[in-house]
Image: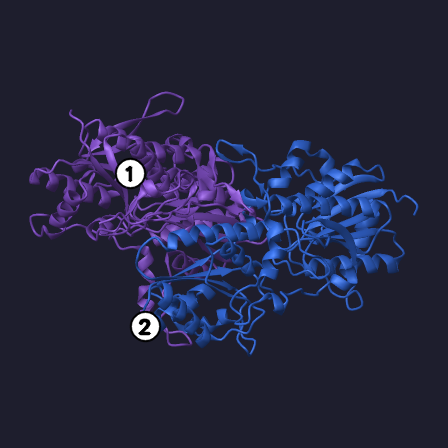
Chain colours: A blue, B purple
Amino acid sequence: MSELKGAAIFGQSGGPTSVINASAAGVFQEALRQSAITAVYGAAHGIKGVLEEKFYDISKEDPYELELLKTTPSSALGSVRYKLKNAEEDDTDYKRLLEVFKKYNIRYFFYNGGNDSMDTCNKISKFMQNSGYECRVMGVPKTIDNDLWGTDHCPGYGSAAKYIATSIMELYHDAKVYDKGLILVLEIMGRNAGWLTASSALAAHAGFGPDLIYLPEIPFDMNRFIEETMEVYRRQNNVIIAVSEGIKDKDGKYISEYGSDLAKCKDAFGHAQLGGLASTLVNILKEKTGVKVRGIEFSLLQRCAAHLGSLTDVNEAYWAGQMAVKLAVEGKTDYMVAFEREAGPDYKCNIKLVNLTDVANTEKKIPREWINEAGNGLKQEFIDYALPLIQGVSTPPLENGLPRYAKLKKILATK
Amino acid sequence: MSELKGAAIFGQSGGPTSVINASAAGVFQEALRQSAITAVYGAAHGIKGVLEEKFYDISKEDPYELELLKTTPSSALGSVRYKLKNAEEDDTDYKRLLEVFKKYNIRYFFYNGGNDSMDTCNKISKFMQNSGYECRVMGVPKTIDNDLWGTDHCPGYGSAAKYIATSIMELYHDAKVYDKGLILVLEIMGRNAGWLTASSALAAHAGFGPDLIYLPEIPFDMNRFIEETMEVYRRQNNVIIAVSEGIKDKDGKYISEYGSDLAKCKDAFGHAQLGGLASTLVNILKEKTGVKVRGIEFSLLQRCAAHLGSLTDVNEAYWAGQMAVKLAVEGKTDYMVAFEREAGPDYKCNIKLVNLTDVANTEKKIPREWINEAGNGLKQEFIDYALPLIQGVSTPPLENGLPRYAKLKKILATK
């Protein structure tokens, strides 16, 4: 494969994680080292920044700040949720991208994201190919949801899982502190796949975890949920429940939407009140059981807790970014960088490449055989899968007792 | 002062913190070293365990597990909220305590808690004195609320403040990730004093904090709140608001109760829906501004996050427990151990003793002159006060990537 000289651009897309910037560090540091890459750009708010010709010249950044990206949560460049239309229906965006690529001689496009972002990558790659514009396109996986097809796991998942498992172990201690009964309902992210909620089983494995775990993979039955909760309560006077935001009943209706009939209800100010899943379940349990119930939503905290990153995850996120660049320079294109786990007792992952067409818009769920028969807990197979992913601690350097994050200058590339 | 030989008992009371067990470690390790102390007991669920003669023989515990208490969150012995009646009205409990103290020759009583717990300490101390039973009583301060009178600060506060400031710095990055507008409302504990909510100002001081901070010390005006929020929103398209659960309007009504007229509203299941403060404010802002608003409650997470303890706080919590024992053995009684900060540029704290009578049931609030004129932010005086309290990181040892907490045998003292 002949050397392809040109500029590289990198964008971050979709919901951020605590390690998406570690992948950015991998892409940037490697791209700056490669002689084939003539300029390194970071797109503001993903594909939108490319369309709007708003991207930063990464060579102008202080190397120490780029290093700090490894432990800076969220998306330093800004993220976006922007779905490209199919080029056959409307190719306006694609033509504009080609125009920008040509203007800056962009020959390397790296995009960091989940399912939708891989779809974006795939569409751009195919359009550039059809237009006869030589450009190497590589996707870098990212999602706390861990639901990307074709990879053993996704960067971002290990850190979120470590944070969730640790926080639940702490809450376990807090919830058992009085000798009065308490039911604790913990709402965890994951709209269609239960990987993140399942990570609560790691806390249980360590001796301080939830009694019941409800995943979107298993149809949710409210009456059974109440029965199972009360069964545990009668036995131990205390229940901890981990529940995925995405649980649905057998008709496919989200349980979080059960409360939406409330839209007509007004508070003292005349405002409609809408609760989330945790508050819906808390209210139902309170009324059905008469027991003290408390709900906690991990909310955004679970996806940006860089102070308790998994070192394994951070290193792999960096590695995925770095390898995307290396492999593109070597001639690879139209792939997502993925992880393949070696068989054997010790954890070891290798990089492999998967076709963007295959990975785009496919979701990976937890295998049914990793979930217990009752559908309210995880089996050892899941523990064996997830435990290696949360090993080691990554934490930002501190200044005055608080994290010191990357501060980028964000100097726009000259037009 | 002549040596007083006898058993010592220690209890934990009130809402737990991530360092209340560090004080327990200080009490236990010091008491086990003291020859005057003939037995060391840990009361199950505070004063209730004493009344019910349910306490553990600490000498039977593995020393390594006692050491692990330093980094184990919540109350290892179990906590309690139990208010003793005044002895003049009803002395049943006191007589029972005296009976138990005599039976086990308990001559040292250590109690770890906040305002109410110091009141308990005080009442017990006075009753024992009036009964002519020689017993040395020492209070050990504890509260994330930091509202105890007579001490520069309270063990538990520094760790909770560090966790809150760090988490807000992370959320700041997450909240600014899209180029769409967002208002984030963060609800922080503190019913009557705003110390914990004020710790969000440390995040702002580090460059990544809330734009507006509302404390219970300042009467809350809903219209002004909306105006101030929108003013920031118009300027920067993004607002982060830290708000104390205890904010009240000028008539003293909790804002969190504004939503309670909803009690008559039912969801699809016929269950009443009640929201907290964050959801009340989120709903009001949504309707008044039309902007995307998100609420996050730090809930129990903020008081048990031992994975991100302040090392200064953990060490001081231990020290307070240890000194309570040392000073009691030396003859002191009827005091709470407190901290006094030395003047000067470098942080240094000394132990002092304050009378239980003075400290019981008094609350310390944030001085008005530490709050900005508008009443929606903190001044440098607060930063100078709080920053030294969050220095250093305390984290539990890890096993398999997750915390290894103390596992006590909890062998009951033989009756």
Q: Residue at x 60, y 66 (%)?
A: A192
Q: Which mark is residue B264?
A: 2
Q: B330 and A163: which one is in front?
A: B330
Q: Residue furthest right?
A: A2
Estimate the x, y position of residue B228 in percent, counting from the top left. 42, 48
Subunit under mark 1: B
Residue A276 seen in render: no
Question: SS class of the residue under badge 2?
Answer: helix
Q: Which mark is residue A252?
A: none
Q: As drawn, is A357 to the left or to the right of B111?
A: right
Estimate the x, y position of residue A252 in percent, counting from the top left. 56, 76
Three-letter amino acid code of the residue under disc 2: Lys
Q: Quadrant of the N terminus of chain B?
A: top left
In the image, residue A3 sits, relative to residue B272, either above or below, namely: above
Q: Which mark is residue B141?
A: 1
Mark 1 to mark 2 CA distance (whole Å): 42 Å
Subunit under mark 2: B
Question: SS class of the residue under badge 1?
Answer: strand
Q: Residue furthest bottom?
A: A251
Q: First in sequence: mark 1 or mark 2?
A: 1
